[in-house]
Image: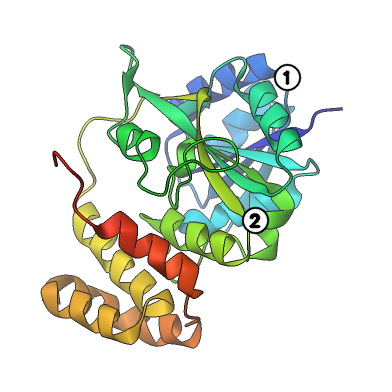
Amino acid sequence: MPRTTVVIVSRDRVDSLLRTLARLSELAVPVVLVDNASSDDTVSRVRTEFPAVLVLESAVNLGAVGRNLGVRAARTPFVAFADDDSWWAPDAVERAEEVFDAHPDLAVIAAQTLVGSGGTPDPITPLLRDSPLGQGVAGPAVLGFLACSAIVRRQAFLDVGGFSPVLFFRGEETLLSWDLAAAGWALCYVEDVVAHHHPATGRAPGADVVERRNALLTAWMRRPVTKAVAESLKDPRAFRVALPRLRQALRQRRALPEHVEAQVRALERPRRGA
């Protein structure tokens, strides 16, 4: 029986999605697609061309929270996330399962992400590989990952609530990483688990300020108040954008344990040669 399910969230990107599904079909694992209220023919085409894919239709765009629906629908102990422009190397799932079996306290495998047809390592790769947190249970210990190239232990993900609706989308992985670490789970970068990412060129308008907004909201939800205030004063534009969500964020405020806060501070220190 398959032990890993691939969960994809997509919206209005049917051509890219179909290419991804064709790649994933080679893995012989269950695939769950959460359609975030697409206005194109995503749902009908996927059901016609890939009938084995379980399609969950959302009436509204849930952002990253759509992944939570996919994880709940999965019936396997592990879930590999993919975007509609990313997929997993042929041996990635089997290798990840071996690592999870060997380390029952491991919640997240952050994979090596190769970008484009040339297979260039994503810029996050050296940050994960050379993590200042040192060696973890299965590789360098990390407190972050790319959602399009991460494999999670399903029950750990569900136990901490998955991705937060406060953040919606962009940078949502940080809060989940902190919450998993606070709950006692390990997160590691594993070099020989590989994902391929073929993103569209360019960034969506406003993406940068949304990422900064979410970083501030995450700080208000988990960091010391003095730190959250200082970060907000440093970036008044992002704070203005965050204000409509700030009350919701504060209702979910829960300070990190001291040892996790210390790890977060370690990641903020300038690195040699940077």
Density class for disc 1 (Cα within 10 Å; few <14, some 14-19, many ≥20) is few
- Numbered mark located on residue 91 in the image: none
x%, y% of residue 3? 78, 33
Compare residues 80 and 98 and report the one nearer the observer: 98
**Which quarter of the image is occupied by the C terminus?**
top left
Which residue is the site of mark 2?
157
Is residue 64 shown above or below 197? below
Q: Is residue 234 above or below residue 149?
A: below
Give the residue drawn at x 49%, y 41%.
Answer: 135
Res. 165 visible in picture: no
Q: Is residue 98 visible?
A: yes
Which percent across, then down, holds residue 149? 48, 35
Residue depicted at x 49% and y 20%: 19
Name which quarter of the figure residue 262 lies in.
bottom left
Residue at x 64% of width, y 29% of height: 96
**Mark 2 belongs to which amino acid?**
Phe
Q: Is residue 88 left or right of residue 130?
A: right
Residue with the mark numbered 1 = 28
Name which quarter of the figure residue 175 lies in: bottom left
Instruction: Left or right? Give the position of 260 relative to 268.
Output: right
- Identity, as a three-letter code, of the amino acid under mark 1: Ala
Query: What secondary structure is found at the residue carrying circle 2?
Result: helix
**Residue 54 rendering spot, x and y as whole percentages:** 71, 38
Secondary element at image label 1: loop
Q: x, y percentage for residue 217?
A: 34, 73
Residue contact at pointers 2 and 1, CB within 8 angstroms: no
Nearer-the-camera pick, 196 or 51:
196
Q: Measure the C-alpha gap from mark 2 to mark 1.
A: 23 Å
